[in-house]
Image (cartoon, rainbow, N blue to C red):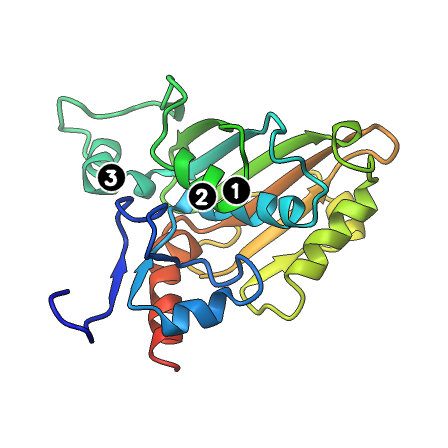
Amino acid sequence: AGNETTRIIDTSTAHRTADGWVFGFAELTRGQRDAIAKARHVSNPGCYSTGAIALLRPLVESQVLPPQYPVTINAVSGYTGGGKQLIAQMEDASRDDHITSASYLYALGLAHKHVPEIATRSGLKRRPIFTPNVARYAQGMLVNVPLHLDLLNGSPELEAVHAILASHYAGQDIVEVVPLDQSAALSRIDPEELRGTDRMRLYVLGTPGAGQVNLVASLDNLGKGASGAAVQNMEIMLAR
């Protein structure tokens, strides 16, 4: 980047909270797509971060979720999210470090590399607790954020939380907020449901009147969670 015209999309964690870099989540907030289009330096979001921020940012921005709320984020990802080494450990049974587990927790010290960008880009003032899990399938991710409704400003019901997300992402062709009646009819969500796509699906789940909500983001960790987002940012920057 030694001249005034070179434009960069950085897919590492190096600049995701850095000044002078535009965060490459086009649906983040109003004007973000335009900011990406004009930017010289764009930081591509992490996969877990994309799901968590998609759920949290609209609620913080609408002043419903207090920035000091003690947020807990749980997630499961396909093993391709761990890169070449983990893929080999999962798929090559001849390796000494072959992993046979169906799933496992990691980042046990609560210091996953995506936490800073989740906090910064969501607008949180308290560091969230993040517990990721890798499972024995290749692609797909679920990120879920459970919340107590009585600890939110105004003690909203499920419908109000859903309305905030639906309004925030209205008109977006990549991020979908699932209607409440469709979410209520589900008995399970498959983390591989969006495998091979660059889309993201958001669910608002809970029992009416119970005072709790479970927010879930579903995406392909290699799609909207990685290369799909990079391609989207490139197309925005090239005005395609």
Of the numbered discs 2 and 3, the one sitting upstream in the chain is 2
Extreme top residue here?
Answer: 109
Q: How many discs appear?
A: 3
Extreme right residue here?
Answer: 209
Helix, strand or loop at label 1? It is: helix
Give the amino acid type for the residue marked by disc 2 in the picture.
Answer: Ser
Q: Are marks 2 and 1 in contact (CB under 8 Å)?
A: yes
Residue identifier under label 2: 49
Q: Residue at x 78, y 44 (%)?
A: 184
Viewer-nearest of discs 2 and 3: 2
Q: Is residue 185 visible?
A: no
Residue identifier under label 3: 87
Q: Which mark is residue 52?
A: 1
Helix, strand or loop at label 3? It is: helix
Q: Looking at the picture, tell me which residue is in the foreground, 193 or 84.
A: 84
Instruction: Indicate left or right for 65 with 210 as reference.
Output: left
Rate crowding at label 3 as few (under 14), some (14 to 19) or many (20 or more) other CA atoms within 10 Å: some
Q: Is residue 85 visible?
A: yes
